[in-house]
Amino acid sequence: MKYSKLVEVYEYLEKTSARLKKTKAMANLLKETPADLLPKVALLLQGRIFPSWDEREIGIANLLMVKIISTATGFSQKDIAARFSKTGDFGLVIEELVSRKRQRTLFQKELTVEKVFENLQKLASITGSGSQERKFHLVSELISSAKPKEAKYIVRTTLGDLRIGVAAGVIRDAIAMAFLGRGKELKEMKEEVRVLEWAWFLRPDYGEIARIAKEKGLPGLKKVRLEVGKPYHVLLAEKSPGLKEALEEFEHPIMEYKYDGARIVIHKKGSRLWFYTRRLENVTRQFPELRDFVMRAVKARECIIEGEMLGFNKETGKPMPFQFLSQRIKRKYDIEKMEKEIPIQVNLFDITYLNGKELFDMPLSERRKLLEKIIKPIPGKFLLAKSLVTKDLKKAERFYREALEASQEGLIVKNLDAKYQPGRRVAGGWLKVKPVMETLDLVITGATWGTGKRAGWFGSFILGCRDPDSGRFLECGMIGTGIKEKEEAGGVTFRELTRLLKPNIMEEHGSRIVLKPDVVVEVAYEEIQKSPNYSSGFALRFPRVLKIRPDKALSEVDTKERIERLFRMQKGKR
């Protein structure tokens, strides 16, 4: 398939804001795509070369991209950097410069989707001495054969910044419309979309899901099953107004500590093990001691079990806030050193697969019994989550206080009669109860350079909520509180946030910075107000950062609709 055909669709998607029009354009392209090429096209439409759970990365930094564009176009690196500072988009820079380039290669080969995909995928496997030079040649080869608009999207895809406003839900709907619709309008395809989404929850790769939908239709999607060693989207908890309300929600509730840690999904197949986070990150290498725990404590040939992993202070033996554990999750080197500095504990609470059988349709009460049967706890290291079965509010409140005194976040109240529903927040299944109730998970989209004591750091930050239709992020407030100047004070620091955000700088206008959305933070606030000053139409009053959330994907950033719903729920609002 000619790459120019995909580029035509990119151009249309970038200029069109209407979700249904985007969906139809993508559906038409998918229909025309051969089955063997579908996984590649479906990934490229998302600006990806690998599924979201694949740990491989292209690894092209902005400085190398400046060098690539300079060599491919003949313009100086200084000129390219200046143009980028104005636009914040290397795609627009390369498009303009390629169109202005006087000499074109004679007998230039037309780019294909296969060639673009192949070159970009190779980038992830290049490491070691001379790797930057080899990566340089692979991208340069594509750009030298590209027309201006093709060059724009090659560069954007390489940098993971496609900018066409396509969220996961649009891809899902396009696949449904292309292969399951049979002439139906999208609004008439609720069952088809539900089945397709369920398959994606279990196999989070729309490239593979598109191929199954084309070749095997709805029956094929219904046969998608969990596979040991491959991640899936886990069940998520919904927020509850309070403990009393959560207990009243279920006839048979069980309460568990809501640990201030990271969700860990453990796959075991004989002696082979895989560990995944809720964001589908493969962290098997980062936690070698967990392998020892599992082999000692899990008495099952094949299983998938879930728990919460805590980091501990080796001096005091007390649990550490999540951001310390996240250092181990992100770490690719010095793993043995980190293992000694931040020991872990795993608290197990669910099982979804056992010896060839999925357990989604089994109520939690029975899943819990199976989990207890196959686990031989290792005290202090690998054990069942602390729990209490009761409807008595006073007993529940005592248990809640215990959790808070143990430096945990609160409680998860679960329905013992509920099935497991992957990929969803289910009010009828799990409810979380925390002292600070209505926090928001937001992404940082901008910043300003600090002055005085904050000189050299970003001193304030622009927060963004998610527009689920376009996939874009809308401003909803500015934050500078809840962030520490000194690391010994604990909590999130200006230094830490600046270090995380600097690689995401897209534009600078004096002291103001535009950032690529990447870093998610949990935010508390006093009130939500309507505001014409922010693109969401809302502003948070007195927002403060509670913690950085590297475990949260951009798709989990709270939506404008949720902010609006919380605004209406505020006392005195209608």
Image (cartoon, helix red, strand yellow):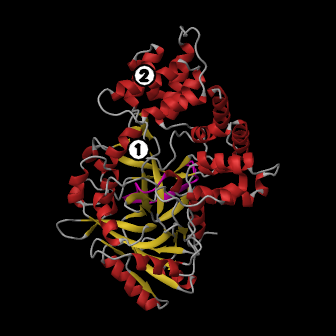
Q: Magenta region: which residues?
A: 532-553
| Residue type indicated by callout 2 | His
Q: Local crowd at mark 1 within 10 Å, few (<14), some, or many (≥20)?
A: many
According to the picture, the residue beneath numbered tag 2 turns out to be: 137
Quadrant occupied by the C terminus? bottom right
Give the CA distance from mark 2 to mark 1: 35 Å
- Which one is closest to the eye, mark 2 or mark 1? 2
Residue pictured at 80% horizontal, 51% vertical: 185
Query: Vertically, is 246 above or below 549?
Result: below
Q: Position of residue 453 (x, y in %)?
A: 25, 47
Q: Position of residue 220 (x, y in %)?
A: 68, 55
- Secondary structure of residue under mark 2: helix
Please give the label number shown on residue 447: 1
Q: Residue furthest left?
A: 315
First-in-chain label (2 vs 1): 2
Residue pictured at 30% horizontal, 76% vertical: 406
Q: Position of residue 521 (x, y in %)?
A: 42, 56
Residue pictured at 73% horizontal, 45% vertical: 178
Residue 374 picture quarter:
bottom left
Check if residue 446 falls in the magenta segment. Answer: no
Quadrant occupied by the N terminus? top right
Residue toward you, 476 or 306: 306
| Residue type indicated by callout 1 | Ala
Q: Is residue 548 left or right of residue 418?
A: left
